[in-house]
Image: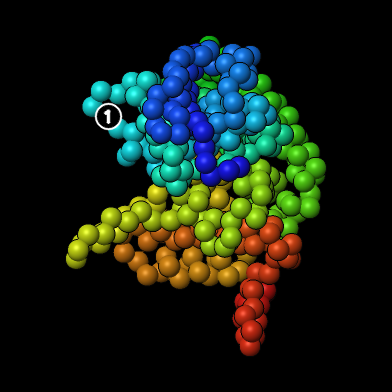
Amino acid sequence: MSHAIAMTIGVDLGDRSSEYLALDAQGDVVRRGRVSTTRAAFEKSFKELRSARVVLEAGTHSAWVSRSLKALGHEVIVANPRKLEALTKHIRKSDRTDACTLARLARDPILLSPIEHRGEEAQADLAVIRARQVLVRTRTKLINCARGIAKSFGVRLAACSSRSFFRRALEETPAIVRPALEPLIEQLASLERAIATYDARVEAIAAERVAATAPLREVRGVGALTATAFVLTLEDPKRFRHSRTVGAFLGLAPRRSQSGERDPQLGITKAGNSYLRELLVQCSHYILGPFGEDCALRRAGLRLAERGGKGAKKRAVIAVARKLAVVLHRLWSRGERYERFPLRSGETPPSTPRSE
């Protein structure tokens, strides 16, 4: 599209209605209004406008709105809300001022730190993973509730996996508490069946994308869920010029607030997809745990943990998760086989403990 943009439009997306404001090439307001946040309303309102640069803030509706507007011939920029926050704060904030600010910032898109939405098919497959996530978290809350109720009667339910809890819980529950726990256990059994259905669907999605997910699953501790979520969330490995930037994209890089002589050690940024970050951290715990295989990732994490100091183990887990993100992207982007101890030129394989 030509650099000379005749019209820039800022849209402040709302759940039920959205405010928009249009500027001409000189920066004068030529149109403003409100539109219902539905496909039909957006297509009707923007179809009559000539090709323009439209700016949205990333959110619940931004994916389908951006696809609809692109289909109408508009250039669409989806602004990163984390980077946009410092530019859009107003003492007197309103939908109208937000739309105006977006329209004016659209004249210099670099300020918006634009993001790219994934395709509709990938979004639909990710919805399966997110729905499963909700059920798993609900299961955890119900199990904690059941344990807490039993504990208040002096009974500590035996430790077991979440998947087998609903089978064992009632066996150890006092009769006086059964009326409170039986309906809850029934819900847990139903949840378990639903989660199993989602697990089968995730395996099917991984099989559909076997070329991308298979190399990632060669890493011990990375299963179908993490591999599929990684591929669907990033969608295109070529969007990252260097694999080392993937960890920062997923919020696993440390924040920094350096000024003069002051450069404090801060936590991670927690930017990007929170659930994928959570999955990578879970994989990191496995790699560093008792069942993790001997590999470069594990050794790097253990060396960091051995340094000691405040939060050493936690830092090691995050560091391994960040390195794992880099490894997974390299396997995906280069189509390589996973090597537990990748060699550089001139290196020899490290010795591994002999099994008894």
Q: Is residue 139 above or below residue 297?
A: above
> How far across and how far down the image is residue 279, in percent?
56, 46
> Tag 1: Cα neighbours inside 10 Å, few (<14), some, or many (≥20)?
few
Q: Is residue 189 above or below residue 351?
A: above
Q: How is the image coloured?
A: rainbow
Q: Label 1 belongs to which residue?
A: 90
Q: Nearer the viewer, residue 217 or 356?
A: 217
Q: Is residue 143 visible?
A: no
Amino acid at circle 1 = His
> How far across and how far down the image is residue 90, in percent?
27, 29
How many marks can you see?
Answer: 1
Instruction: Give the quarter of the image for residue 328.
Output: bottom right
Q: Nearer the viewer, residue 121 or 42?
A: 42
Q: Is residue 345 visible?
A: yes
Extreme front residue here? 26
| Disc 1 element | loop
The quarter of the image holding the N terminus is: top right
| Residue lying at 58% horizontally and 22% vertically, measured from the top left | 49
> How far across and how far down the image is residue 226, in percent?
63, 46
> How far across and how far down the image is residue 135, in percent?
59, 27
Extreme bottom residue here? 346
Q: Is residue 129 above or below residue 114?
A: above
Does residue 255 appear left or right of residue 281 in this picture? left
| Residue lying at 45% horizontally and 34% vertically, measured from the top left | 25
Q: Is residue 176 above or below residue 61?
A: above
Does residue 94 appear left or right of residue 320 in this picture? left
Instruction: Give the quarter of the image for residue 45.
Output: top right
Q: Nearer the viewer, residue 187 or 61?
A: 61
| Residue lying at 65% horizontally and 26% vertically, measured from the top left | 72
